[in-house]
Image (spheres, coloured by chain):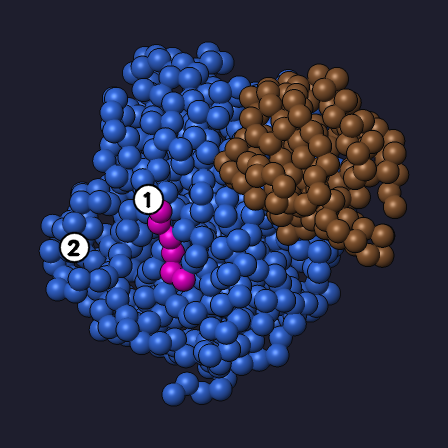
Chain colours: A brown, B blue
Amino acid sequence: MEFGTPDWLESFVKTLNENEAYEDAAATWEGDFLFIVWPDKEKGINEEVVMYMDLWHGKCRGYEMLPNRDAKETAFVYEGEYANWKEIIEGRLDPIKALLTRRMKLIGDRAKVMRATRAAKELVRTAQMIKTEFP
Amino acid sequence: MAKKDSYGYTGKILNVDLTTGTLKDSPTPLDWARQYIGGAGLAARMLYPLLTEKIEPLGPDNPLLLMAGPFVGTAVPSSGRMAICTRSPLTRLWGESDIGGYFGAEMRQAGYDGIFIKGRAEKPIYLSLLFGKAELKDANHIWSHTISATQRLLRKDIDEKRFFTLSIGPAGENLVKYANIMSEGARAAGRMGLGAVMGSKNLKAMIVVGDQPVPVANHDAIVELARPVNKIMMKDFMPDCYRIMGTATAVGPAQEIGAMPNKYFTQGEFPTHDNISGATMSETRLVGFDGCHRCPIQCGRIVKVSEGKFKLPRVNGPEYETIGALGSMMLIDDLDAVIKAGYLCDDLGLDTISTGNSIGFAYYLMDQNKLTFKEVGMNLVWGDPEPVIKLIPKIAYREGFGAILAEGTRSMGERYDAADLAVHVKGLEVSCWDPRALFGMATSYATSPRGGTHLDGDMYMVLQGQVIMELGIDADDPQTDEGMGEVAAKSQSWRQVSNSLIMCQFPTYSVDEITQFFNLVVGRNTTPQELMHIGDRIITLKRLINLNLGFKSEDDSLPSLLLQPLPDGGTNGMVPNLEKQLNDYYAYRDWDRKTGLPSAAALKKVGLADLDK
């Protein structure tokens, strides 16, 4: 499945909701996200890809592809270049390390995120469980 | 008007002889400054011929050198630090600790790059350096007072509304081996017992205020470059975290990977750690911020405990190391107790890391039936904060069991036939970054000229993502030994540069920006690689100093507890292979693993051939 498509998001959410390790790590997490991939014309991504996920107590209780970042207001936005997303999904770049090295950006409550580094890692591990193709 | 070859330096050192009571200016050795930058690097070069094995750390001949670097007091962001160097009474080796706040910047603006202190005053005195005028003044009225009381009393002495202090507390006066030097009750030259050195000299405090600009090559360009750098720092993830949660931001992530000491380094998990996290502190106790000269981050915490048995008015709150050493070390998850313990250490003039380690070691020894209720005068039970609160003043005043704790963990280990259980490196208690979680810390601790400090090589930051790719300071896997010795060596060299400029580690401006700032301050055209070369020179010089002070290569080691697998938690039972890392480290530096000596070629390479014996 191609990364950033509705099918990919659906598969990711399904896998996430079956993942006990994520459920344990994110047991107290409350907060919805926009995951945004910046445009990359070389890869044929002409507009921002915006994925919405409502993460709540170890489960994803709602998700959808959005037409743009203004379509929904969320507690958190995690965004960056396509190439960095690819490295994260492939497990070559830690999602928190990406923030520290300015390769990804986060909008939202830092305190909450710094309490949930294991949940972030489990989220990425879940993405690695699904077969992902990159354009 | 500064000359071209002296940009970045005020050109003067204040020499204080406490025995004779004389004060004299001498020129800053600019030839050495070009080779060692300033701060701890220049201090090492100046102290090299003076630090010999016959110098007693608490004797009058031990020099104490306060040294700023070319960045200090300028418009370079986050550069309000100063190095203080001597022979450490705790390790008996190279002693260095740097301190934030404003003292360093004001000292430079008062016209001095450094203050060189020797001798011993007959009676307690303090040094006043107001607008370039230095005087020694009677300190009988402030002797025996805490840090906060000392500051209050000094305020009555001085007509100036705005001035800055360095002072010791009762711990320094009582020669506690890990007494610190505090600035404004908030910032500490915490490690290695520098406060005891001040105490041994009957030097209670120093006050300073200045109003002269530090001469730099291109002030306007520095301001121009600082503007976007400051802007980025206000938005960057990590500085923003430090602003919101202080350095205690790291509590959650460190616990997650098993890097924080729990139950005296023997337990990997501490399920209730969030009770003492920076996040919890910011949500429940934070009432203000505190920062250093020209720093937009303001990582210092002002907290208030409104009720309960640890009630406190507005005080400086604990940073990460304090929370680890005085909290998780004893499985204490009561944030108010940790705030109180940290405040007591600060006010009495004790290093929180060594204090927490020493008390934690006592808890551990009692747990192992090597220490009794009778000896301590109380039971030490994991998770109980009361003994910590009671023991801290006893350490500072050397009362009862406190006098034993005041000597540090190495001494305690010898006393209780438990030397193999004491966690220290070269006699310095270990910081709160466990090498079993972050393997590069094994080399950082083992080879640090100071011992168990995280501030001689920032592998704890590198291995959590704050890499410096352009200098090869990067490692993907925090738990591999492959190449780690070399990366740690590079990180150590770069840290020598930071400690000489001097600048804080928390800003995220790049190596190129740091180099640009350096060139704009001193009026040169240096490259990052040339700065790294200076870093190699400084670390090698510190090795030579330690060899002169009795260092043996076997001192480059780790305590056995840190090489045993943890039974639980994020380290997954892994331990670093220290020997492999050290072999790589020594090979990279071209030092002899058996003798610890740099080779003649290594000395020549770093420009120290003239010191080859």
Tell me if residue B507 comes above or below residue A20 in the rendering. below
In the image, residue B466 lies at what x, y percent? 63, 49
- Identity, as a three-letter code, of the amino acid under mark 1: Gly
Q: In this view, does B291 lie to the left or right of A121?
A: left
- Where residue B338 appears, as percent x and y from the top left, is 37, 29
Q: Is residue B180 above or below residue B1?
A: above
Asked whether B348 falls inside the magenta stretch, the response is: no
Near-viewer residue (A76 or B72): A76
The residue to which callout 1 is attached is B288
Check disc 2 and report the residue beneath it: B154
Out of B606 and B119, give the one closest to the viewer.
Answer: B606
From the image, give the main secondary structure of the stretch colored magenta. loop
Q: How crowded is mark 2: few (under 14 residues within 10 Å), some or many (20 or more)?
A: many
Query: Residue at image x 32%, y 47%?
Result: B186
Residues shaded magenta = B289-294
**Left or right relative to B301: residue B441:** right
The quadrant of the rendering that contains the N terminus of chain B is bottom left
- Residue type beneath disc 2: Leu
